Image (cartoon, rainbow, N blue to C red):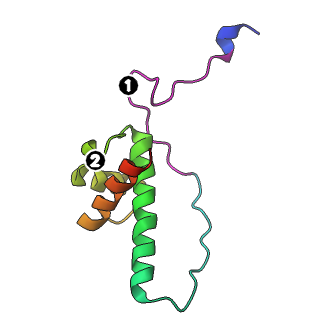
Amino acid sequence: MPAAALKPLPTQSTARRPVLLDLPYAPVEKSPLPPGRPREWYITHNRRLKAMRLAIALLDSGVYVPNQARNETIRSTAELIGVHPPSDTTCHMVRAFMRYSR
């Protein structure tokens, strides 16, 4: 087999144009949250999960720097992946995840 046939497909970092976002094929099976915690814990937990999903989707779409992730960009990505529009607090958390992931 020639070596050219084994060449991998371009990724986001090697492509000349942005690679389309690969949407998840099936949602991850959810497990119930532990009972008995204060309400604020559940709110923060769900907000972190949402921010993580959005940060991953932004990274997949080619937004690598928190400065590029404005609230409008994050909200349009949320609409694209089928998540309710995030609040300003969640948008701030998305940028924080992108900032501290290095």
Label 2 secondary element: loop
Residue under numbered circle 2: 69
Looking at the rendering, the stretch of residues picked out in magenta corresponds to 6-24
Depth check: give the residue in front, 39 or 50.
39
Which secondary structure lies at badge 1?
A: loop
Outermost residue toward the bottom in this view: 36
Say how many tags the image has: 2
Amino acid carrying label 1: it is Arg
Q: Mark 2: which amino acid?
A: Ala
> Which label is found at residue 25?
none
Q: Is residue 19 above or below residue 3?
A: below
The dominant secondary structure in magenta is loop
User: Looking at the image, can residue 50 be seen?
Assistant: yes
- Residue 100 picture location, percent across and down: 40, 51
Dot 1, crowdedness within 10 Å: few (<14), some or many (≥20)? few
Residue 87 visible (yes or no): no
Q: Earlier in the sequence, mark 2 or mark 1?
A: 1
Gap in angstroms between the C-alphas marked 2 and 1: 19 Å
- Residue 91 horizontal/vertical position (percent): 29, 59
Instruction: Kindly give the residue lying farthest to the top in the view shown.
Output: 2
Pointer 1 residue: 17
Q: Tell me the quadrant of the picture where the N terminus can be found.
A: top right
**What residue is at 32 percent from the left and 53 percent from the top?**
95
Q: Is residue 56 left or right of residue 69?
A: right
Vertical placement of residue 18 versus 96, above or below: above
- Of residues 91 and 9, the one nearer the viewer is 91
Q: Is residue 81 found left or right of 7 in the rendered image?
A: left
* Disc 2 crowd, CA 10 A, few/some/many (<14, 14-19, 20+): many
Assign the C terminus to one quadrant of the image: top left
Please report the residue visible at 45 percent of the width from the left and 81 percent of the height from the top.
42
| Quarter of the image where one finds residue 96 | bottom left
Residue lying at 59% horizontally and 57% vertically, measured from the top left? 26
